[in-house]
Image: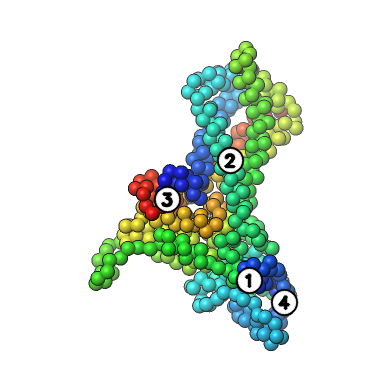
């Protein structure tokens, strides 16, 4: 089996999903850690410091390019898997098993991923794009703490952010476990551990993210 | 449990042949005993149809004791019906009440085309086995069965994987129509034993390539296969298949017959 066949077979495609997914999970950890600096209640001093490091460190900037490439790969491969899998059963069942044999979020990874992508577009428009734009063409980084305060003063935006975090949580409950199962780690020895760590991760990380817009809107972060 | 008899409405998929469009037909059956198996209920219906001069419903069956893997009905949205770890022939009518309506469909997957009514063509499974589900055995005198020491744990896991009867319920239940649980069982029961070692580096890749060629979907670790498998084949086998695949891709010779 040559390398191209190895990564385009059914398991190969899943390996691409798994490895890019695990990279995106590590990104979430870093993103969450940096942003959680707002909870020091120091007017965003520590957060701005951390943000400055992330925006200017050449290694981080290089990894950022990789992040976009792998995110793109994850999206394209996911959409291809979704459309291929839909084409494998031309006559559909009249009665479906519903939730008797599987979880709704496991069957809805494509939908959840699409929701996250739509959320991500809005999220980048709020923070990443203006920041990089001003960094490149203007007077350096923007005041992200102030920007967060401004963006999250709108309750409608906060609701969308919370919904985005919920979609992310459900995507992760399946995705975390599935990534390690695809790597062959879903053995008797590890499967419970992977499941439980995955569930904890899928609750804790989106919850910390969701607390940011909620905290700003409720004037709890200053 | 008290014995009782019931009248049922059956909506059964009827399809003349592979090219026919097919559709549901509704039948009434009367006086069905709660002690009957699901297939015996179909026997009663077919006798009734023959007596009326109509064509009986074609369905697959053979041993009727849950080990041959021939029966294959998708009953009210469930492969082999609602009972846990049973085949259609082991499902009994005490599951149902008088007046129930039961919808019966064939396995649905492009890789399992309908031959007639509820009978589907599962030869794609045979071709996957031919692609790698075998071992090399030298000719000559039979080797003493106990000459080769095998760890108890591995022998048990191999045996559990070998319990797969190839019925195709995993494909029928999978929202992606993937055959991964079947392939993983076939790869696992050989990969765990020393007898399976000579072909180990090519088995998983060859069988996966054949699986893809047959038009099965990609596994997305949903787990409906494991929930519906009449033999309780575990998702751990899919993890093992993934490891075997990674092993043969990254440490195999890369030549193989591919």
Q: What element carries label 1?
A: loop
A185, above or below B25, in the image = above
Label 2 resides on the chain identified as A
Which residue was labeled with disc 1?
B17
Which residue was labeled with disc 2?
A76
Which residue was labeled with disc 4?
B27
Nearer the observer: mark 1 or 3; the answer is 1
Q: Is mark 2 on a helix, strand or loop?
A: helix
Nearer the observer: mark 2 or 1; the answer is 1
Q: Quick check: do tags 4 and 2 share a chain?
A: no
**Residue displayed at 65% across by 45% down:** A111
In x, y percent, where is residue B134? 38, 63
Q: Quick check: do tags 3 and 2 share a chain?
A: no
Q: Do the residues labelled 4 and 3 touch (CB within 8 Å)?
A: no
B167, above or below A54, in the image = below
Q: Is mark 4 on a helix, strand or loop?
A: strand
Q: Which of A7 and B177 is in front in this view?
A: A7
Q: Quick check: do tags 1 and 3 share a chain?
A: yes
Image quarter where the C terminus of chain A lies is top right
Crowding near pointer 2: few (<14 within 10 Å), some, many (20+)? few
Q: Are marks 2 and 1 in contact (CB under 8 Å)?
A: no
User: Could you tell which of marks 1 and 3 lies nearer the N-terminus?
Assistant: 1
User: Could you tell which of marks 1 and 4 lies nearer the N-terminus?
Assistant: 1
Please indicate whether residue B238 sits to the left or right of residue B109 in the image: left
Label 4 resides on the chain identified as B
Which residue was labeled with disc 3?
B245
């Amino acid at each position: 089996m040559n390398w191209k066949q190895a990564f385009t077979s059914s398991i190969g495609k899943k390996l691409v999903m798994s490895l890019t997914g695990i990279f995106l999970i590590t990104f979430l950890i870093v993103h969450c850690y940096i942003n959680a600096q707002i909870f020091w209640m120091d007017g965003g001093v520590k957060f701005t410091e951390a943000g400055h490091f992330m925006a200017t460190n050449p290694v981080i900037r290089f990894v950022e390019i990789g992040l976009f490439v792998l995110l793109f790969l994850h999206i394209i491969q996911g959409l291809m898997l979704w459309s291929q899998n839909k084409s494998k059963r031309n006559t559909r069942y009249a009665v479906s098993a519903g939730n008797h044999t599987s979880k709704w979020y496991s069957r809805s990874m494509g939908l959840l991923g699409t929701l996250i992508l739509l959320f991500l577009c809005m999220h980048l428009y709020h923070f990443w794009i203006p920041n990089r734009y001003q960094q490149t063409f203007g007077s350096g980084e923007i005041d992200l703490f102030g920007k967060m305060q401004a963006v999250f003063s709108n309750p409608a935006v906060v609701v969308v952010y919370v919904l985005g975090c919920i979609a992310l949580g459900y995507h992760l409950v399946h995705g975390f476990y599935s990534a390690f199962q695809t790597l062959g780690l879903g053995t008797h020895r590890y499967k419970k551990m992977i499941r439980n760590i995955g569930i904890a991760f899928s609750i804790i990380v989106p919850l910390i993210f969701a607390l940011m817009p909620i905290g700003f809107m409720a004037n709890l972060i200053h | 449990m008290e014995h009782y008899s019931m009248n049922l409405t059956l909506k059964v998929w009827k399809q003349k042949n592979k090219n026919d469009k097919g559709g549901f037909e509704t039948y009434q059956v009367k006086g069905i005993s709660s002690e009957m198996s699901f297939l015996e209920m179909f026997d009663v219906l077919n006798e009734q149809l023959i007596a009326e001069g109509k064509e009986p419903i074609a369905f697959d069956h053979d041993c009727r004791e849950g080990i041959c893997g021939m029966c294959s009905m998708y009953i009210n949205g469930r492969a082999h019906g609602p009972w846990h770890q049973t085949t259609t022939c082991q499902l009994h009518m005490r599951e149902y009440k008088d007046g129930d309506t039961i919808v019966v469909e064939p396995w649905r997957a492009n890789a399992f085309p309908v031959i007639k009514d509820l009978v589907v063509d599962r030869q794609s499974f045979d071709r996957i086995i031919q692609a790698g589900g075998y071992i090399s055995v030298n000719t000559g005198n039979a080797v003493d069965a106990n000459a080769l020491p095998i760890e108890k744990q591995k022998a048990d896991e191999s045996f559990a994987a070998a319990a797969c009867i190839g019925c195709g319920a995993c494909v029928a239940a999978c929202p992606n129509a993937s055959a991964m649980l079947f392939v993983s069982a076939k790869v696992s029961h050989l990969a765990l034993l020393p007898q399976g070692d000579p072909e180990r580096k090519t088995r998983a890749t060859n069988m996966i390539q054949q699986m893809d060629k047959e038009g099965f979907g990609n596994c997305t670790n949903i787990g409906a296969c494991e929930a519906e498998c009449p033999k309780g084949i575990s998702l751990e086998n899919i993890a093992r298949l993934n490891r075997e695949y990674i092993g043969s891709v990254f440490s195999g010779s890369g030549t193989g017959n591919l």
